[in-house]
């Protein structure tokens, strides 16, 4: 191969690797599971963002939203109620996010109870994961 | 001056002999968390507290009320709750 072809090949492989690194089959399967449960073909990152940043009633007064612990920016580290660091939620920053179904289920159970006083629907969960995976 | 010198040397020697008993670099007085599940789950939001910090009755009470754990929902699966409870109880302060 000449130099130009080599450079293009390396660049293409680099882009492809980066793209593959962000996609994760387990995460995709988790999101697909929520889609089946919700009866929708796909989710909306915009709706996920609005839900994540919006204020909700029904939960604890200290946590009316996801932002008291996770901050307004999923690229930033958050803090637990006693100050321990929470790694950023954005998949681009923390690639292992949402790759364990039990972990996903556990934190949705806990956090939706705290913020909303109820379980999140499959639609809400799918929107949130889609939003956080898109960043 | 000579007495001060002598007393200083005596004092320094005593400190050198006895300081190991005040050292925090020795064996931990409360055993570390040795159960992997306990360490993982109980350090999500704060430091994983060693089982020797509390008596069994306190650990049992905490593990029975995880959905309202000092104001937070720390609930776990039934299996995880059981494993962690048993580990903490077996290694509690009064064991």
Image (spheres, coloured by chain):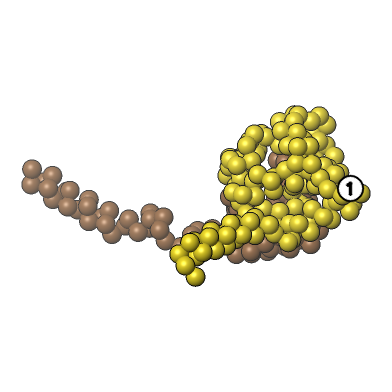
Q: From the viewer's perspective, is B52 left or right of A56?
A: left
Question: In x, y percent, where is residue B20?
Answer: 35, 59
The quarter of the picture where residue B18 lies is bottom left
Q: Nearer the viewer, residue B14 or A42?
A: A42
Question: In x, y percent, where is residue B36?
Answer: 63, 64
Q: Is residue B64 above or below residue B83?
A: above
At 60% from the left and 42% from the top, the residue drawn is A75
| Residue marked by disc 1 | A40
Q: Nearer the viewer, residue A125 or B15?
A: A125
- What color was chain A assigned in the picture? yellow
At 22% from the left and 56% from the top, the residue drawn is B13
Q: Nearer the viewer, residue A51 or A10?
A: A10
Q: Is residue A9 above or below residue B6?
A: below
Q: Is residue A42 visible?
A: yes
For disc 1, the chain is A
Q: From the viewer's perspective, is B77 left or right of A17?
A: right
Question: In x, y percent, where is residue B45?
Answer: 63, 47
């Amino acid at each position: 191969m000449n130099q130009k072809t080599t450079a293009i090949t390396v660049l293409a492989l680099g882009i492809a690797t980066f793209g593959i690194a962000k996609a994760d089959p387990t995460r995709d399967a988790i999101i697909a599971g929520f889609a089946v449960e919700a009866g929708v073909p796909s989710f909306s990152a915009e709706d996920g963002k609005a839900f994540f940043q919006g204020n909700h009633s029904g939960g604890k007064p200290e946590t009316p939203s996801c932002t008291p612990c996770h901050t307004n920016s999923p690229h930033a580290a958050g803090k637990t109620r006693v100050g321990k660091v929470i790694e950023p939620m954005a998949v681009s920053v923390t690639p292992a996010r949402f790759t364990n179904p039990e972990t996903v289920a556990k934190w949705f159970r806990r956090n939706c109870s705290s913020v909303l006083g109820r379980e999140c629907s499959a639609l809400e969960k799918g929107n949130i994961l889609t939003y956080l995976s898109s960043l | 001056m000579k007495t001060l010198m002598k007393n200083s040397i005596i004092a320094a020697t005593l400190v050198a002999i006895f300081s190991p008993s005040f050292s925090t670099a020795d064996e931990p007085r409360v055993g570390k968390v040795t159960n992997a599940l306990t360490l993982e789950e109980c350090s999500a939001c704060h430091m994983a507290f060693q089982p020797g910090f509390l008596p069994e009755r306190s650990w049992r009470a905490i593990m029975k009320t995880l959905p309202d754990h000092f104001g937070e929902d720390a609930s776990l699966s039934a299996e995880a709750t059981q494993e962690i409870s048993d580990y903490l109880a077996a290694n509690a302060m009064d064991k």
